[in-house]
Amino acid sequence: MLISLSAVIGQTKAKHFLLSCHAKDKMSHAYLFKGPGGVGKKMTARAFAALINCSAPRDSEVCGHCPSCKKFASGNHPDLQVLEPQGAGIKIDQVRALQKDLTYAPFEARTRVVILPDIHDTMRRPEVANSLLKTLEEPPPHTLLILTGDEAGGILPTILSRCQLVPFAPLTSREVAGLLPAEVAAEEGLTLAAVAEGSPGRALRLHESGLLEQRRQMIADLTALRPDNPEAVEQVYNLAAQAADLKENLPELLDLLTTWLRDLLLLNLQSAANLINHDLTALLDQDSQAWRHPGLLAAIDHVRQARRQLQRNCNRTLVCEVLFFALLREKW
């Protein structure tokens, strides 16, 4: 599929910067597109790859008719490589194969483009990161590397220092809602956009997985937990089992729980202007009475610790049990 930069919603600053680099012929050998997941980084990378290899661009747009554009449209351009992560990130064998490929000149394009998505995941593998660093330190001619990564950090400073940083920002709620399928009601779309924090990709995943409703149920169950209830222990075990059953969706649910605790923290500070979970105001008002500022800060740390444990493949049920008992302890 051929993508033009104008088709990328939002990201005005990022697109303007890239177009300026191209127009002035001041291209870096490597760019790092850094920002929240699902806001168009990979789409922009593909669009920019098509533009810089288009034979007859018009007003910073691909022509759509030259041989290069046709091959980008068919998904068969020989000088576009995308190293998709395998499992927890890009593997060392992929980087070695890439390095071998880069010893040869591009097949036909002016500039060969290599896209390395979600590079923050790859940073957890030191041998892969070090091998990639070597490629960045000794860039082959006529090659552009585009790395994409989340804004949360975790990218090695040595990698950062060898790339031109291009920041990507969250989209507005209305921009996100406008990108959702037509069957999503307007009010539901705005809720998805808010909970997804400006990420169309994340909003779509929440819609397709049903996690938005599961978030409502989990928060309602957590709000109902009280330490003086003799059934609280059994309720925690049941809630942990339900959460663990979500499997690959569990990390996303914990991220949604973090936004809930963040909203409670804002209410605790008497600042309700920027609430994310605006569709659950009644539950927010109810639950905010049970929390104090230190307990909320500790609760957020507990959720972050649970996320890290899941990344290390710890037992999901045990992680959830420890987390929910910790939240019960911090509450009240």
Image: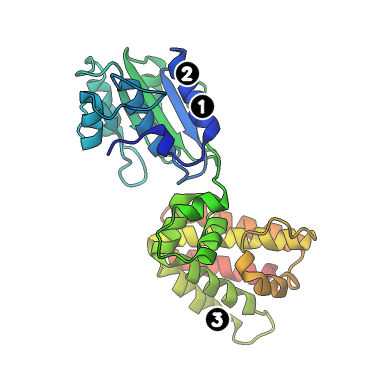
In this view, 28 is above or below 1: above
What number is the disc on residue 235? 3
Q: Quadrant of residue 241?
A: bottom left
- The answer to whether one can see residue 19 in this image is yes
**Residue at 47%, 24% in the rendered image:** 18
Q: How is the image coloured?
A: rainbow
Q: Nearer the viewer, residue 18 or 88?
A: 18
Q: Is residue 295 left or right of residue 139?
A: right
- The answer to whether one can see residue 163 in this image is no
Few, some or many residues within 10 Å of mark 2 (<14, 14–19, 20+): few
**Residue at 47%, 42% in the rendered image:** 9
Residue situated furthest bottom in the rendering: 230
Q: Quadrant of residue 45?
A: top left
Distance in Å between CA atoms under marks 2 and 1? 9 Å
Query: Which comes before the other along the chain, label 2 or label 3?
Result: 2
Callout 2 amino acid: Cys
Residue situated furthest front in the rendering: 58
Distance in Å between CA atoms under marks 1 and 3? 53 Å
Image coordinates of residue 150 in percent, x first then y, are 49, 40
Residue holding disc 1: 16
Secondary structure of the residue carrying tag 1 is helix
Image coordinates of residue 270 in percent, x first then y, are 80, 61
Query: Which comes before the other along the chain, label 2 or label 1?
Result: 1
**Residue at 25%, 32% in the rendered image:** 72
Residue holding disc 2: 21
Image coordinates of residue 63 in percent, x first then y, are 30, 26
Secondary structure of the residue carrying tag 2 is helix
Few, some or many residues within 10 Å of mark 1 (<14, 14–19, 20+): few
